[in-house]
Amino acid sequence: MKQGTATVIKNTGKDYLLSELPVWKPFPAVIRGKMRLKGLHTTNPVAVGDIVEYEAEDEPNAVAAITKVFPRKNYIIRKSVNLSRECHIIAANLDRACLIVTLDFPETKWPFIDRFLVTCEAYKIPVTIILNKTDLYGPEFDDLKNYFIKVYGEAGYEIKETSVWKNEGIDELRHFINTGGLTLLSGVSGVGKSSLLKAIDPSLDPKISEISLSTLQGRHTTTFYEIYPVTGGGYIIDTPGIRGFGLIDMSSEEVSLYFPEMLRVMDGCRYRPCTHTHEPHCAVKEAVDRGEISPERYNSYLGMLEEETKYRQAE
Ligand code: GDP
Ligand code: ZN
């Protein structure tokens, strides 16, 4: 019998693939017995990115047994589509997230971006915005693009501009991922996620296409997540369906903590807790009025509050 520590690199239902990273040598594993994590009702007790302890018989093709999950530094979850309060852990131990967005072709909706950013803040995952297809934004987009960069830059986010077609910003993005650790790549369909991945590391192409295809065909089945090694260093996890990638168990008072520009000023609010909606002498609303917090971001905030309230009332 041998024992070791490894990282979960793939999770397909009850089956797992592990590798002793940084060594890339995947081997199969299953969970032995019941493994329940305290306080978290999840459909998968072990997720991609988890660092686990395993045992395996000393024979070729032995399937290892996961015996322990080490504490996670962070994780992201998706609410179950059904109404059971279960959630599914998409990935654990992320070092950064990159959200790929486009101003047009297709237009990434700002509330969607904000929701993603809030989720990352809540899970303590540093996030970078990748503004792709910059080759398409002619002079008529100058105002919008500058405003976008101002809003998200001032909120506190790093924005990297890329164009796969013009091969701009690609080396920089590759270096960023090559710095190591696990990078989550996300973006709505059409923003150029597959094209970017292929440009960053052509060896990822067939694998990624394969997974995209299988998710298309298997829409109604479980979505599987997988980690890929990137040539030059680092690992990526591609999340095809992030529609349900959501906030969970967040109180109304909590939401504004995840808007960095609101967090910076909310000490000045007269009322505690302040929802920054109707209260007098609210520092957040005053910052919106002065133009220091963008109306778009503030509207996203209001939308999230509303959704949270609805969600709570439905319970
Ligand atoms: P995904 O759905 O996010 O994986 O997007 P794809 O990589 O499939 O790209 C969607 C479309 O956008 C394809 O037609 C790509 O050729 C195109 N595309 C991707 N990146 C760029 C870019 O930087 N500039 C332009 N003009 N088109 C791009
Ligand atoms: Zn306030």
Image (cartoon, rainbow, N blue to C red):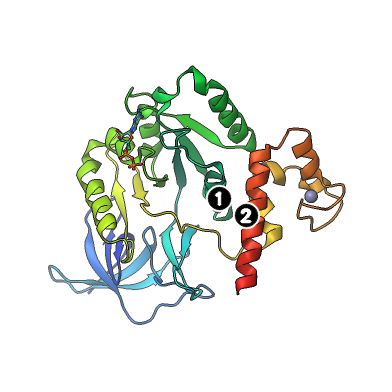
Q: Amino acid at mark 2?
A: Met
Residue named by callout 2 = 304
Left or right of 148: which side holds 212?
A: left
187 above or below 175?
below
Q: At 45% across and 42% down in the image, what residue appears?
A: 98
Q: Quadrant of the N terminus?
A: bottom left
- x then y, percent, for residue 114: 57, 46
- x then y, percent, for residue 282: 82, 47
Q: Amino acid at mark 1?
A: Arg
Q: Are marks 2 and 1 in contact (CB under 8 Å)?
A: yes
Q: How far is mark 2 from mark 1, CA to CA?
A: 8 Å
Q: Is mark 2 within 8 Å of ligand 2?
A: no
Report the front residue among 22 and 35. 35
Number of marks present in the image shown: 2
Left or right of 231: which side holds 162?
A: right
Mark earlier in primary sequence (2, 1):
1
